């Protein structure tokens, strides 16, 4: 083999070696953040379409190769409901709460991380059961920021602003022409009203027109229509209420406190952030069984707790620009039979109530009429065939 051939073979080898050396760039930095759980108290910042989301938990889990999964959910400590009424035996334990995306209790993101100086960033898009969305965020060992953007429900048929109906009636005939309250109650049993049997539907109508004050215009539905002005059903699944604070000052509820989805025609699921319904601690608590509402609250919680993550099932009825949203028989009747009916059948509790009314100089004359009225209310519940309670709206122009 001559020298020329050897040199000719060495030239490509040298070129290859030089190219290999010149391309020996530093390897892409790897992200090695350990698994961590982030909450509002431990470095989590979350938003949906620009509005802050509170009360969620994000579980960060590395998946290797600069990838990770982020699972977003929420839990609620039921003992916090003790703020509604002081009790020696408050509800205990945790229950699943609503997710960050409407109708999705747990949202899992499979992300590819881009390393940076102080944190790693990520972005992507997704398709959940009831909505589509995009997301972006950044993470490090102490914090996680996650923004959901362009969130939009797949069914936006009810999206828009809905004005609460005003209460109007004929003052001569007491016929109700318009009512913000949607209420239907049908039962095979009548209500004993001051010794006279009346269909429960007539009792409901009487309550609608009965004035709260000397002014005939101040009825229960009229007062409601003065407080709540309209509701926005937004395309991102948020329900935002426009109301009158203290009856005088216009105010708007914050997004991401109440969400909704449309699972089927004439159906709606409403998701309530539990922190939004917790009241301040009661100033005092009566020892009377009749006023110990926390025992009743704990019983109701056992039935409604799954609705925090699964949604409160509501029915809807739309005709043109008119919309009714209400709780129907399937939801209300079990609650009445399980929680209210036992109270109406409790002889000791009824006696306490009668004694309390009898001691009032202005109401004492009605005390003897209470036992048959309370008993008939129990009969009405047992005989209920249909019950609906909700609100009536008209589409804003």
Image: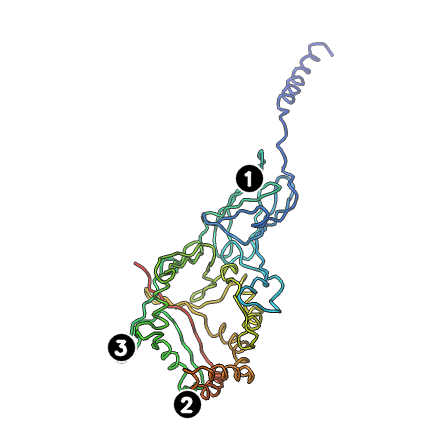
Count every numbered label the image shows and give the total: 3
Residue 171 shows which numbered tag?
Answer: 3
- Which residue shows up at 58% across the image and 43% down it? 143
- x then y, percent, for residue 265: 43, 65
Residue 121 shows which numbered tag?
Answer: 1
Mark 1 falls on what kind of element? strand
Nearer to us in this view, 4 or 178: 178
Q: Quadrant of residue 305?
A: bottom right
**Residue at the extreme top:** 3
> CA–CA distance between discs 1 and 3?
65 Å
Q: Is the image coloured rainbow, by chain, by secondary structure, or in one colour?
A: rainbow
Residue 195 shows which numbered tag?
Answer: 2
- Which residue shows up at 45% across the image and 88% down it? 369
Earlier along the polypeptide chain: callout 1 or callout 2? 1
Nearer to us in this view, 396 or 80: 80
- x then y, percent, for residue 157: 39, 59
Mark 3 falls on what kind of element? loop
């Amino acid at each position: 083999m001559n020298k020329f051939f050897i040199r000719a073979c060495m030239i490509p080898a040298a070129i290859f070696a030089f190219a290999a050396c010149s391309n020996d760039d530093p390897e892409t930095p790897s992200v090695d953040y350990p698994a961590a759980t982030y909450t509002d108290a431990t470095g989590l910042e979350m938003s949906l379409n620009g509005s802050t989301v509170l009360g969620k938990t994000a579980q960060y889990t590395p998946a290797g190769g600069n990838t990770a999964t982020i699972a977003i959910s929420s839990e609620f400590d039921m003992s916090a409901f003790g703020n509604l009424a002081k009790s020696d035996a408050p509800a205990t334990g945790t229950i699943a709460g609503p997710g960050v995306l409407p109708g999705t209790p747990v949202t899992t993101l499979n992300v590819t991380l881009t390393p940076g100086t102080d944190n790693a960033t990520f972005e992507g898009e997704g398709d959940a059961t009831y909505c589509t969305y995009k997301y972006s965020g950044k993470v490090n060992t102490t914090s996680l920021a996650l923004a959901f953007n362009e969130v939009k429900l797949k069914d936006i048929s009810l999206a828009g602003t809905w004005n609460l109906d005003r209460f109007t009636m004929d003052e001569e005939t007491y016929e109700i022409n318009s009512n913000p309250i949607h209420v239907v109650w049908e039962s095979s049993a009548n209500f004993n009203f001051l010794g006279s049997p009346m269909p429960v539907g007539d009792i409901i109508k009487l309550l609608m027109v009965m004035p709260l004050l000397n002014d005939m215009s101040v009825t229960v539905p009229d007062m409601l229509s003065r407080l709540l002005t309209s509701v926005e059903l937004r395309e991102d699944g948020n329900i935002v209420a426009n109301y009158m604070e203290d009856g005088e000052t216009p105010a708007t509820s914050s997004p991401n406190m109440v969400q909704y989805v449309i699972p089927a025609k004439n159906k709606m699921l409403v998701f309530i952030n539990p922190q939004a319904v917790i009241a301040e601690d009661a100033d005092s608590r009566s020892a009377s069984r009749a006023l110990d509402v926390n025992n009743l609250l704990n019983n109701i919680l056992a039935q409604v707790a799954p609705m925090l993550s699964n949604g409160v099932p509501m029915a809807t009825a739309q005709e043109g620009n008119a919309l009714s949203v209400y709780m129907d028989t399937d939801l209300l009747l079990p609650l009445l039979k399980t929680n209210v009916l036992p109270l109406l059948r409790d002889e000791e509790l009824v006696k306490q109530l009668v004694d309390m009314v009898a001691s009032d100089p202005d109401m004492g004359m009605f005390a003897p009429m209470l036992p048959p009225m309370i008993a008939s209310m129990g009969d009405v519940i047992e005989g209920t065939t249909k019950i609906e309670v909700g609100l009536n709206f008209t589409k804003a122009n």
